[in-house]
Image: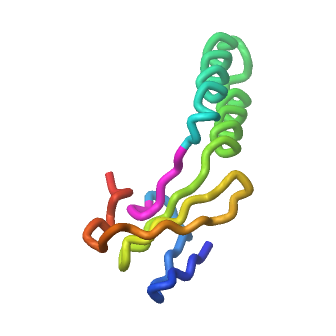
Amino acid sequence: MKIKCNCGNTILDITDALSYKAHYIPDENWDEIMEKIDSYIKEGNQDKEKLCWDMRKTIIEKTRLIYQCNNCGKVYIEDEKRNLIEFNPLNNENTDVLKK
């Protein structure tokens, strides 16, 4: 994925472990994910490979992405339809808020 920021910078999502990308779980989805994890643990006698893939699928479906431009600090957040909504920082001082 390529995101063209209004400042002219291009935000690339072409690999893993990006310092300017994050996954977030909307609070409305949190309990559902926790309940799925609990049920997968309780159903421990099932095929572990299938359980892993089912859990990954649930997490991917219920999480959304956030990107931050490392030039101007603008943040792009996915909405429920996976469209990116942009947010402007109050200043350009924190262009790496998604780093660990």
Residue 93 included in the magenta stretch of the image? no
Q: Is residue 21 magenta?
A: yes
71 is higher (above) or lower (below) than 16 = below
For residue 94, which quarter of the picture? bottom left
Determine whether, in the image, residue 3 is placed left or right of residue 70: right
Image spot of residue 59 (x, y percent): 63, 39
Indicate whether 95 appears above or below 4: above
Q: Nearer the viewer, residue 89 or 17?
A: 89
Image quadrant occupied by the N terminus: bottom right
- Is residue 54 found left or right of 15 in the rendered image? right
Residue farthest bottom in this picture: 8
Residue shown at 69% from the left, 27% from the top: 51
Q: Nearer the viewer, residue 77 or 90?
A: 90
Residue 47 in the image: x percent, y percent?
73, 22
Image side of residue 91 versus residue 80, left or right = left
Q: Residue furthest front?
A: 90
In terms of image quadrants, where is residue 36? top right
On the image, the x and y values in percent for residue 20 come to 42, 64
Horizontal and vertical percent for residue 86? 54, 68
Quadrant of residue 57 within the rendered picture: top right
Left/right placement of residue 4 relative to residue 42 reads left
The residue drawn where x is 50% and y is 76% is 11
Residues in magenta?
Answer: 18-24
At x 56%, y 70%, the residue is 14
